[in-house]
Image: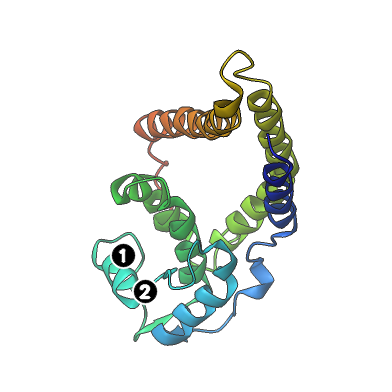
Amino acid sequence: MKQEYTALLGDILRQMANTDHIRLEDVPDIDLYMDQVTRFIDEHLKSSKRYENDKILTKTMINNYAKNKLLPPPQKKRYSREHMLVLIFIYYFKGFLPLNDIQAILNPVTDRFFRDDRDFSIQDIYEEIYHLGREQIQATIRDVMDNFHTAAASFEDCPEEDREFLQLFAFICLLGFDIYIKKEVIEKMIDALPALPPEKKG
């Protein structure tokens, strides 16, 4: 493939390696109004936008999440740190899952761990997931590079004028196939999710 594609992928992967997703300590530990919530999310996730005018989370989206019981309702129109963490999870999931699947994943978590007065809360869950994600970045970069090299070695017998385009197409297909397989696994795991045991009282 052309050097420009190699350089472009290198730039993308360097950006990916240097992306620092929202750390727990970055999330305000005070209740916020809607405008403050959308401003915070937009500022901290703007690097994930494809186009400048893309919206990360709008007021309408957040209201719909609460209305559909995907997000616990705000208290006196204010959102806690726990609300913010749930919204961050929703944002990442909604890129590849429908809302009913996100509900199947998140509702048991929010029902059981949402309150911050627990010994183990959604803040602890977010912190653990954050660190797991950081550790996975390098493995993901290596996997993308392996796919790139595999695609670059493909279509050796096709006409030379078509080879580069088809190699790029093969690379995109390999990445797409990976997403397809992982999405299938996610959907089957969601369908098999066990119910959490009832919380002990007293």
Residue most toward the top? 157
User: Looking at the image, is mark 1 or mark 2 earlier in the sequence?
Assistant: 2
Q: Residue sitting at 49 percent across and 28 percent down?
A: 177
Residue most toward the left? 67
Task: Tell me if residue 19 can be seen.
Answer: yes
What kind of element bears circle 2? loop
Vertical side of 60 occupied by 133: above or below? above
**Looking at the image, which is closer to me, 189 or 49?**
49
Q: Residue sitting at 40 percent across and 49 percent down?
A: 108
Q: Residue sitting at 59 percent across and 80 percent down?
A: 28
Q: Is residue 25 left or right of residue 162?
A: right
Q: In which quadrant of the rendered view does residue 72 lie?
A: bottom left
Q: Residues within 10 Å of mark 1 (few under 14, many from 20)?
A: some
Picture coordinates of residue 67, whole percent (x, y): 24, 67
Q: Residue sitting at 34 percent across and 77 percent down?
A: 59
Vertical side of 86 occupied by 77: above or below? below
Q: Is residue 96 left or right of residue 49?
A: left
Looking at the rendered structure, the kind of residue marked 1 is Tyr
Picture coordinates of residue 69, whole percent (x, y): 28, 61
Vertical side of 106 occupied by 175: above or below? above
Q: Which residue is mark 1?
A: 65
Picture coordinates of residue 87, whole percent (x, y): 45, 65
**Looking at the image, which is closer to me, 109 or 117?**
109
Vertical side of 96 occupied by 31: above or below? below
Looking at the rendered structure, the kind of residue marked 2 is Thr
Q: Residues within 10 Å of mark 2 (few under 14, many from 20)?
A: some
Q: Which residue is mark 2?
A: 58
Task: Tell me if residue 202 can be seen.
Answer: no
Picture coordinates of residue 57, whole percent (x, y): 41, 70
**Marks 1 and 2, Cα distance to the nearest angstrom?**
11 Å
